[in-house]
């Protein structure tokens, strides 16, 4: 498989120490580790949202760490999707307009898809994520799970190659978390790479591979392979045993 994302000796102040890893295209990679171990910081560095102190990051054959801020913003908009816990949805817009926002931004100054085409694409995504009918609702008028699914729709508007998710199910109850994970797994099956930070062994169990971060260093790795129907419990148990051995 071709390389999707690669970090080489990534350092950030005293938080991250020479982190190196690779992600293959189509991979779903989990990052676990205690609170404060540097998981979110790592995500910000590899997604080009922050500037590492040293080290390099590539998305495919583009060296992100060699780009200007504007070039990085363009890369994030067109090739990456983000699903974070603090979702940065606009309170003064309805769900549909929130979902449309990145696509309108990406189209600005270009002869791209028309607003009508983008709106149709947004509605299609909402249907796919089972939140049709909520287009006109404000973000305060939907449940946490529905909002998180809207956030996934928004992150998919520009068909990203890679999706970065930081605790996407952290604020959700079990049912809503399972719904959101089912969508992320589906997307991944369709070819989108997913890098997901999570505390949840069940969520991590859906990943093909998990890295364990401690004090800003990768201290462990668990290979799980692709999920098969009905093996969720087995994988969750495997993650829990691994975490136990590591001393989580
Ligand atoms: N902007 C910042 N400036 C200085 N220190 C920071 C900054 N952001 C995070 N830190 C520190 O870096 C360390 C790692 O934080 P980070 O948010 O990456 O942890 P995390 O593993 O994501 O934790 P959690 O599981 O609680 O989300 C912490 O000690 C934190 O206080
Ligand atoms: Mg964090």
Image (cartoon, rainbow, N blue to C red):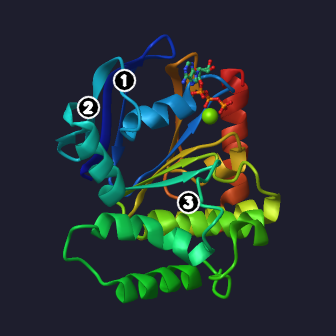
Q: Earlier in the sequence, mark 2 or mark 1?
A: 1
Q: Earlier in the sequence, mark 3 or mark 2?
A: 2
> In the drawing, what numbered circle is on residue 65?
2
Mark 3 packing: few (<14 Cα in 10 Å), some, or many (20+)? some
Q: Is residue 94 above or below residue 74?
A: below
Mark 2 packing: few (<14 Cα in 10 Å), some, or many (20+)? many
In which quadrant of the rendered view does residue 233 lie?
bottom right
In which quadrant of the rendered view does residue 114 lie?
bottom left
Cβ–Cβ under 8 Å for marks 2 and 1: yes
Residue 158 in sight from this viewpoint: no
Mark 1 packing: few (<14 Cα in 10 Å), some, or many (20+)? many
Q: How many marks?
A: 3
Per the model, the C-alpha gap separating discs 2 and 1 is: 8 Å
- What's the residue at 42%, 70% (across, down)? 157
Residue furthest toward the top? 14
The mark closer to the camera, 3 or 2, is: 2
Cβ–Cβ under 8 Å for marks 3 and 2: no
> In the drawing, what numbered circle is on residue 62?
none
User: Where does the image place residue 58, in percent across and percent down from the top left?
Assistant: 25, 38
User: Where does the image place residue 118, in percent across and percent down from the top left?
Assistant: 39, 81
Residue topped by disc 3 = 227
Per the model, the C-alpha gap separating discs 3 and 2 is: 33 Å
Per the model, the C-alpha gap separating discs 1 and 3 is: 33 Å
Q: Nearer the viewer, residue 170 or 50?
A: 50
Q: Is residue 153 above or below residue 18?
A: below
Q: Is residue 94 above or below residue 6?
A: below
Residue topped by disc 1 = 52
In which quadrant of the rendered view does residue 247 lie?
top right
Q: Is residue 73 left or right of residue 101?
A: left
The mark closer to the camera, 1 or 3, is: 1
Question: Taking the image as four quarters, which one is ligand 1 found in?
Answer: top right
């Amino acid at each position: 498989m071709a390389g999707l994302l690669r970090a080489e000796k990534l350092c950030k102040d005293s938080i991250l120490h020479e982190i190196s890893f690779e992600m293959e295209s189509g991979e779903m990679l989990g990052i676990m580790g205690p609170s404060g171990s540097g998981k979110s910081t790592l995500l910000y560095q590899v997604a080009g949202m922050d500037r590492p102190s040293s080290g390099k990051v590539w998305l495919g054959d583009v060296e992100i760490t060699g780009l200007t801020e504007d070039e990085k913003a363009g890369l994030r908009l067109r090739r990456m999707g983000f699903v974070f816990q603090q979702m940065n949805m606009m309170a003064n817009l309805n769900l549909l307009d929130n979902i449309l926002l990145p696509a309108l931004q990406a189209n600005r100054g270009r002869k791209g898809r028309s607003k009508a085409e983008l709106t149709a694409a947004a509605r299609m995504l909402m249907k796919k994520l089972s939140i049709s009918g909520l287009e006109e609702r404000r973000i305060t008028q939907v449940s946490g799970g529905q909002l998180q699914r809207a956030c996934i729709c928004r992150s998919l508007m520009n068909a990203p190659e890679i999706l970065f998710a930081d605790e996407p199910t952290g604020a959700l109850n079990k049912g809503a978390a399972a719904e959101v994970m089912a969508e992320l797994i589906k997307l991944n099956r369709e070819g989108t790479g997913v890098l997901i930070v999570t505390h949840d062994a069940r969520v991590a169990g859906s990943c093909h591979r998990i890295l364990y971060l401690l004090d800003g260093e990768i201290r462990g790795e668990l290979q799980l392979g692709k999920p098969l129907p009905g093996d969720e419990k087995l994988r969750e148990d495997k993650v829990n045993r691994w975490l136990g051995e590591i001393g989580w």
